[in-house]
Amino acid sequence: MSNLHTLTELKNAGIIVALPGDLPLAAIIPIADALLASPVLAVDVAVGSAELPQLLHDLRQRAGDKLLIGVSGVETAVQLQSLPFNHLDYISSPCLDDVLLTACQETGVAYLPTVISVWAAQAAQQKGCHAIRLQTGGSAGADYVRAIRKAQPNLSLIVETELAADEVAAYQQAGADALLIGKPLFTGSAQTMADLITQARKFNRAWQTGHQSLAATN
């Protein structure tokens, strides 16, 4: 899958879920299965766990090409080379790094630098990035997305934030191309997979409703 095709698919998915990073492999796989049933079509896994290569392998084996899989927190080319490219669709990095960008271009893995400022978004676009992972939140979160969108109208914005399902529309109207969420979906160790599916579907419905509303007004 090409970088641009991956970005298109992320935007089509709309909702990306950050999988809990503090759980063992055996617990994460059922969560991913439940999300896919929702259906959530993109998940994000944090780098660092020794089980990460096996997790990526298992996710790809179970979901095939139905699920977009990303890894966040990749800082160096060495970390990138340790990952199984054939199981990956994108990485995100706290660094705007030329070596990482080149490596991703060569392997067909989409590269999302994580940014928190207009200046960083501009720098990412100048280096040839087509998308960024924008961290924001709070009462002014959607307004900040709007400011970045105004400054960089051609840059895809994958927005990482914590929000309720009824706040999704505000982020869409502000210019978010997709939302990456985590904690709002997970209610604790006693949560059933049925409840997780219910929570995920609330976000999916909110995204689809907002998408249709935007399409009707454009």
Image (cartoon, rainbow, N blue to C red):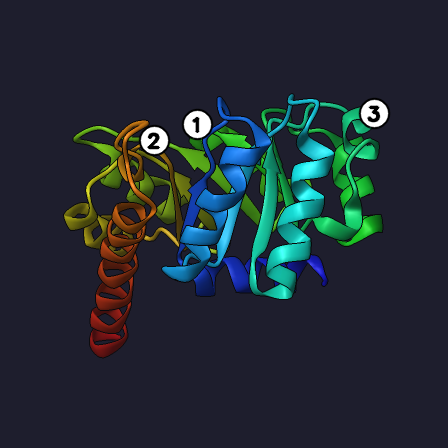
Dot 1: what SS?
Answer: loop
Amino acid type at circle 2 is Thr
The numbered dot on residue 136 is 2
Amino acid type at circle 1 is Ile
Discs 1, 2 touching: Cβ within 8 Å: yes
Q: Which of 108 and 53 is in front in this view?
A: 53
Q: How far apart in space, not on screen, are marks 2 and 3 (Cα)? A: 28 Å
Q: How far apart in space, not on screen, are marks 1 and 3 (Cα)? A: 25 Å
Residue 97 position by quadrant: top right
Query: Residue at the spot x=81%, y=41% of the render?
Result: 102
The numbered dot on residue 78 is 3
2 vs 3, front mark: 3
The numbered dot on residue 99 is none
Query: Is 190 situated above or below 177?
Result: above
Q: How crowded is mark 2: few (under 14 residues within 10 Å), some or many (20 or more)?
A: some
Q: How far apart in space, not on screen, are marks 1 and 2 (Cα)? A: 7 Å
Q: Which of 2 and 71 is in front in this view?
A: 71
The numbered dot on residue 116 is 1
